[in-house]
Image: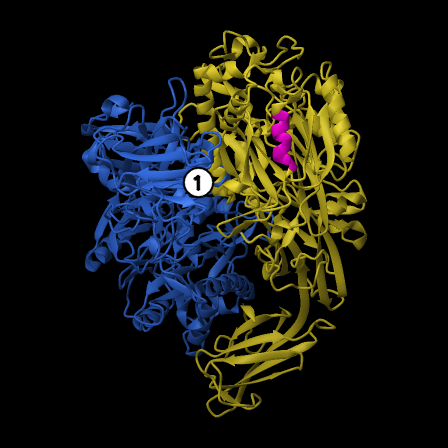
Chain colours: A yellow, B blue
Amino acid sequence: MIRPRTLRVDYGKTANAVCVVGSALHLGLNRSAPPNSTFFSVKCTPNVQYSIVPPTQVTSHLSPIALDGKSVLLISMTSASQHENDSKLTVRYYGENQEVLSNAILHLTALEISLDVDADRDGVVEKDNPNKGSWKWGPNGHGAVLLVNCDSERRYAKQLDTEVDYISKLSDLRDMSEMVLRTRGPAKLPHGYKLTMHISQGDAESVRVYTPRSQSIGSILSGVSGGFTRVLSSQVLSGQVPYLGGVAETNFYVEGLRFPDKDFDGLITINLSLLEPICKGLPETPIFTDSVVFRVAPWIMTPNTLRPVEVFVCSTSDNYGFLKGMKSLVARSGYKLNICHEYMNRGDRWMQDELEFGYIEAPHHRFPVVLDSPRDGKLLDFPYNELLGPDFGYVTRVALRKDVSSLDSFGNLEVSPPVTVNGKEYPLGRIIIGVAFPTTTNGRNMTKVVQDFLWAQKVQQPIALFSDWLVVGHVDEFMTFVPAPDRKGFRLLLASPDAGYKLFRGLQKSGHGQAKLFEGMYVRPFLQFPPPSMCKPIHLLKGRSDQEQITVDEILEDEAFQAENNYVQSCIDWNRDVLKRELGLEDGDIIDLPILFKLHEDVDQEFRAVAFYPDMVNMIVLGQSLGIPKPFGPKVNGHCALEAEMCSLMEGLGLTCTFIDDFASYHRLLGEVHCGSNVRREGFDFKWWDLDL
Amino acid sequence: MIRPRTLRVDYGKTANAVCVVGSALHLGLNRSAPPNSTFFSVKCTPNVQYSIVPPTQVTSHLSPIALDGKSVLLISMTSASQHENDSKLTVRYYGENQEVLSNAILHLTALEISLDVDADRDGVVEKDNPNKGSWKWGPNGHGAVLLVNCDSERRYAKQLDTEVDYISKLSDLRDMSEMVLRTRGPAKLPHGYKLTMHISQGDAESVRVYTPRSQSIGSILSGVSGGFTRVLSSQVLSGQVPYLGGVAETNFYVEGLRFPDKDFDGLITINLSLLEPICKGLPETPIFTDSVVFRVAPWIMTPNTLRPVEVFVCSTSDNYGFLKGMKSLVARSGYKLNICHEYMNRGDRWMQDELEFGYIEAPHHRFPVVLDSPRDGKLLDFPYNELLGPDFGYVTRVALRKDVSSLDSFGNLEVSPPVTVNGKEYPLGRIIIGVAFPTTTNGRNMTKVVQDFLWAQKVQQPIALFSDWLVVGHVDEFMTFVPAPDRKGFRLLLASPDAGYKLFRGLQKSGHGQAKLFEGMYVRPFLQFPPPSMCKPIHLLKGRSDQEQITVDEILEDEAFQAENNYVQSCIDWNRDVLKRELGLEDGDIIDLPILFKLHEDVDQEFRAVAFYPDMVNMIVLGQSLGIPKPFGPKVNGHCALEAEMCSLMEGLGLTCTFIDDFASYHRLLGEVHCGSNVRREGFDFKWWDLDL
């Protein structure tokens, strides 16, 4: 009995009205009464129910009841009419002496109308879910889900499906959410009545609605194409839909066009109204509106602990050895390797930085979606040209060239495994990005459009770390996550100069002070990025350029180098404190890896850090297999002490370490294995809509 | 003991650290231990507190305790230091046989730092409110309030204070919120440490922070002007602030620059960080951050039930009679009348339409703010030129000319008195605007920028009515609110053709069918808007043009006119249903006023309605006095039957009716008393931050 609708009936006249089952009509008795009315009585056919407000003491309404100035009839109907005007209600008015003055007669037609969606999120469009008009997060929540149709049904001459305003292939329907209009009533609507579907101006840029053409709807709608008709779009906010008569269902397909963002909370309302005619030339009045709410599915990232599906890596003119190592690792791990060849990468080897893999999910469908970085190196066409396709989506955010920095590469965009922080659960983990200290006035940051996008997805609430202390400035230069059989199911690995110094001091103590780093390595001259003139060490260790062989003793006696590493450790410690707090970690959840850094003066004439030897934390994680940059550390009994330490730290977690030589082709260009690779992973078993937000 | 900070201490060395009282330092014992350490002991000065994690069984920490690989010291300080490094903590490490291996020594300096605001909203900046870093609505809520400094301290050559990035007058400080930095510690910070205040890029466009120059802060800050220094602004996101030594307070003044809007939720965070130096050329590390949150006060409208302060009306070449009536009404009611003269209004008499009065409020200050409509008729300069001034604010929203329609006039923007709807309280009422039916494809609407602004204020959640059925399209053409001594404290008055027909039928029955409307009235030709060619009646009553004299009988026998009024009634009924639902009203809260409408064909060739005789609902409400358009209805015994009915309906509420002749100068131009006037009212006693949102 929600939203009673005011109805006008005049004495001495017969009025017709349509009543939607579940709604009520409000008839002011005084309004329709002839002058001098003192009593009234009410009579109706069985399908009609009514109550008198305020209630009367009288049990039968067939004999005269005293007319109160405020008396109102609330009228409702219990089931749909078979024929127009098949139900009746009569109010009879009487004078002071109970003489009949006049009748007000109402002919009623009842309709059942329900716009239906999968509000209980089980993949099936149920009938008239009472919660279909709102969204609630959580396992006891409700509200339908919409996917951004960001894949491309076509493999050739492709376009994002969101940019195509018709349905070119039936397979495209799988990317949309079903919506059903269920009606029950007479064969036709009373003359002049209409059903119309409508959305607000604000929602119109985020959604389109289609319906199959076969339902003989075509002629009253525009935008017909193939077997489907476009009912609503950014240009058409309101469109008539057919009333089929009897017991009928009309299917609609709802297509999401935009991801949640700073200016879009992701919620969309679609309304269906029954319009009552007034007279020619006047707009019809909406007398009943049913509404459904969709939430656009967020873009979700996949942490290292999820199962890999595909590994991506670039082939360049100079990375044969690296590629061989990667091929072997991926083959042994049993995953698919996808090589991006030179004609496509044009020498840009930083597969991690140009894109981030994620996915979107609705109860009826899930597919991967690549987020294309505004970095736009020479790999810029790869995500769109090579990845976008049927059931492989694409999304990007465009920034002005001047607003894009190295921090916009997606080595600076990671995600934690699921965590619980002070009782608050993050079953999809938390996104991690690197920025400048908020206290600095001239730091580099991830560009605002990308940050806004990430925050707006909501389901993996981001954490901002401080990464601007690094020349390249990516969080993957000092941290990663690996799976673990115990504790929280993972460990956070952090680069640690302290751990490095401790290891080197131990070597010195045990008589290996003369062991050399970079021993026996063939080092080719600096390749391309960064040109030595644009980024150089602020001091030379023992007067040598970086990567020349150097002994453990020499490293330990250089106090300036120790001071630089103390600084780096303080930067990492700052991030360690943030990560412990924001991910709810204890020290036992963190493993410090022995890695030293060196400060360089970069193009901004700021002092920033790069890894001194290959940065082992910058690894690829493939299930229990780790592909780790080969560190070329000091050898003890013919074995690299850094590799040995790494293996010993990972062994207890059941992880196997494979060291891959990336020195010449990646490390010297200020990246490592992780920077040069990317992994598409399976999604979470956990459904994002079950989050309690 | 929130957010422990990781600290590095090496064995055999003395480290210095600054600890902010209330925070904790986290010292990994294993990290600072010399090789082969098996035991440790801890000693400290009285001001230092520590705990060992995981806890040991040992009660005294002065004798050797077994060193666990994971042992951590959590260190805190109980009060501020008098001198730098006046507190100490020593960790002594022992070998297997409890022989001393080495000491790690920590020299500590404790500081008390608190950035304070009026988080408990009592007008006083309390010390270190535990809730200062967040906002919570409601009487048990917390969070400081910021005003948009949208008035102008200068009366001449004026500018909005938000557009002036310095403090020109001391009185301007009243429009800002006070913020205090309270510190306690040694006379100076340890060498290289700094305090810095900082905001995010996103908040920077919404806020400025000033501090008095006398606090010897000038030299380290830019933007000095007058006695005040600008610390933060849209250009300066981070600025150093002085540490004064000992027990000290530094005052800051925070200025709001933007009202909440679609892209701004109104919340602003200001941070204060203590920075630790690393070495020259490297950015300092923030080791402690205190944050405060402000919410920008929303713009609040004032319903008819609030006490009037000032009445505004235009003087034009042709409205002498009307003006005389208004002067007399306002004088009798005891309020101030403010006449906008012709040099300013340039013939634009629609004082209601160009602006809406409201106010903003913080615990320490409140002032009126005019919202200037994008309508921009010839009155467009009035709000800025005549109203803006000291403690009289101004805000507007700019729209493209093509997006502005008649529905953007603020006769189409009203606010209800306080209501409770299904248990939900709206103690500041609800904003009411008129739009097109959502189901129509080509209706007129209030422009999006204004709607977004109104919705973003949040505290008077808007209701959208259907007003596009009227030629002018304003909600004040069919509804208003008047105070009442009973029920909800007010009545909703609605124009009602049904009530009109009922009254006229009654007159006919009682033998007054020959009484004439518009009798004895001198009607001058149509004046200016709308030119008759652009908006004409769709049929002529008895072949006569509107406003020619016509009898009650003639009105009642015109069936086309009755059909038009039935349509109008159905439009008003639709709004009545919405208002009942959204304001929680019953029929007893609503009074129907006898008003007939006539359909015209307007410039869009659509049929829309205008009032047939002066539209009595379009009144001015001044306390218990109503200024009502004189309807020129049929006379019974020399008295206008419409006036008599109106008086009888209002009498019971203790309201007095004054009928003002607005026929020639307003009604014929499609407006009435309300359209031609405006009232500035006192604000609510209720504080908006006490809302439970």
Q: Chain of mark 1?
A: B
Q: Using the image as rendered, state which of residue B547 and residue B130 is in the foreground.
A: B130
Judge the density around disc 1: few (<14), some (14-19), many (≥20) Cα neighbours within 10 Å: many
User: In the figure, is residue A627 to the left or right of B354?
Assistant: right
Which of B213/B109 is in front? B109
What segment carries the magenta color? A642-651
Query: Is B72 or A260 nearer to us in this picture?
Result: B72
> Could you say where residue A65 lies in the image, as x and y percent from the top left?
50, 88
Q: Residue furthest bottom?
A: A97
Residue B92 higher or lower than B267, as above or below: above
Image height of B243 relative to A81, above or below: above
Q: Quadrant of residue A161?
A: top right
Q: Residue B378, position in %: x, y?
A: 36, 38
Farthest residue to the front: give it. B97
Residue A236 lies in quadrant: top right
Q: Position of residue B478 (x, y in %)?
A: 43, 59
User: Does the magenta stretch mainly form a helix, a strand or a loop?
Assistant: helix
Q: Circle 1 — which element?
A: strand
Q: Which residue is mark 1?
A: B72
